[in-house]
Image (tube, rainbow, N blue to C red):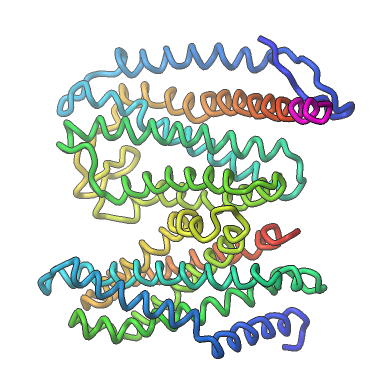
Amino acid sequence: MATFAVDKTKNTIRLTAMPKVLQGLTVITVLGLIVTLYLGYFNAGTDIQQGEIQRIFYIHMPTFFGAFTAFGATVLGGMLYLAKRDDKWDRLAVAGVEVGLALALINLITGSIWARPIWNTWWTWDPRLTSAAIMALTYAAYLMLRSGIDNLQTRRRFASVYGILAFSTVILTLVIIRIRPDTIHPVVIGASPQNAQGSFEATRGVVLALLPSLLFYSTIVPITLMWYRIRLENMLDVLEQKKIALLSEG
Amino acid sequence: MNTPFFSVVMAIIRKDLQAELRSRELVATMLLFALLSVLAFSFALELDRLAREEVVSGVLWVTVIFASLLGLNRSMSIERENDSIDAMLLTPIPRSAIFVGKLVGNYLFTATVGIALLPLMTILYNINMLNLWVIATLLLGTLGICITGTLLAAMTVQTRAREALLPIVMLPVVLPILLAAVKATTGIINNAPVSDWQTWPQVLLIVDIIYLVLCLLMFSYVIEE
């Protein structure tokens, strides 16, 4: 697969093949998906109380940490953009938001599917659920803010500022089950709140399926997806340049 | 107290206060809105006494946040409309002084409205809210709202959607403040033991400090032209 990239020094467009590392990452991602699904579906034992539905946890929790990584990349990209004013850091920030938003939505949807049989409802206004939903909405607001600004430099600056500020909702979602005792969301690592419903023990089988999945979803998946997204953003920039060049000729 | 930073801050506060004293535009709008909102809530939630005790702090804080949105939008669009922000940027003054000046002005107005709500809600909901700790929580909470709000309003007035965008970008960010403030206020007005709610004003203070540092650092990026 080949694509366009901007040669900064000459400001001309040339074709670059997909980097070898990205090819490798793509292969690892596909294999990782298969392996983690296998571990969760077949290797881990069935939960005595919850049955098969508990297996969704092996995707549910790791995707949140994937979103965490991606939103963390947005903070990093934002800070570096404000310091260095290099467009590539802003591309990292956008990629982080879009990938993180997708993973956060998977996290919300899988949680909802699990909650239907266990809590007997698709959705409840639990503190954890509410803050997770607000977190997703914050990053949707980030995208709205971006699209509301025409000037490219201003857009990148404001997006960087907001991307850094928005991370507070991610931290809130992370700590809320530990500071609000009235949540019914279970805590798997450490003691669950008293009224948590649907908790289960982190036994050896659970850990064996969870740990690889957690590592995979919080590193390889967001990094690979963000890389593709950054390349897409590059291509869009090239397209924009071509358009401008063509229009100025005509 | 005579450093350039401090005199700039004081000058901006004085300007905002003077404009407000002459027009009475901001506080009057916010106060009227807050009054209507509290009345609307009391009609919309037909509550018995027990239920009222549970929700009244939520009503207070949602009202304060929405009222602050009105004030923040107006306070920043005034600077935009007459290009006075550009004039301020032309002068050799620290950007963070502009932020602190606007922040203190916004804070004075919002906190005034918030405190004015307390006797009003005491009467309307028949729950005593005139308590020093409630006032302290209110001062801490509105400070956090104004810190993030001043930064974000400076951004959104420069966008195409203008006023419409501020609630969307601000509400998620002030959520930690709303959470801590509501928890603290509920505990205080229900006469819960101090140990039950004392962590929440502390959480508010910490969140305020974090936001203040972040927003002070980032404000110069928001208004550069």
Res. B195 visible in picture: no
Relative to B23, is A196 above or below?
Answer: above
Q: Is residue A235 left or right of residue B4?
A: left
Residue lying farthest to the top in this orientation: A1
Q: Which residues are magenta?
A: A241-250
Where is the C terminus of chain B found, in terms of image quarters?
Answer: bottom right
Residue A29 shown left or right of residue A49 in the figure: right
Picture layout, residue A11 above or below residue B139: above
The picture places residue B5, in percent across and down from the top left corner, at 74, 79
SS majority, magenta: helix
Residue A207 in magenta stretch? no
Along the line of sight, the residue nearer the viewer: B183 or B17: B17
Residue, far left: B48
Image vertical order of residue A151 relative to residue B68, above or below:
above
Image quadrant assignment for residue A206: top left
Instruction: Kindly tell me whether residue B123 is visible in this rendering.
Output: yes
Where residue B134 sits in the image (x, y, percent)? 34, 79
Classify residue B166 as left or right of residue A53: right
Identified at 67% across, 61% down, the residue is B217
* Side of B1 where B176 appears, left or right: left
Q: Residue at x 41, y 58 (%)?
A: B175
Q: Is residue B4 above or below residue A105?
A: below
Residue B192: x and y in percent read 22, 74
Is residue A242 shown in magenta? yes
Quadrant assignment for the N terminus of chain B: bottom right
Q: Residue at x 36, y 68 (%)?
A: B181
Name the quadrant containing residue A59. Answer: top left
The residue that appears at 30% across and 34% down in the rendered structure is A111
Which of the pair B204/A193 is nearer the observer?
Answer: B204
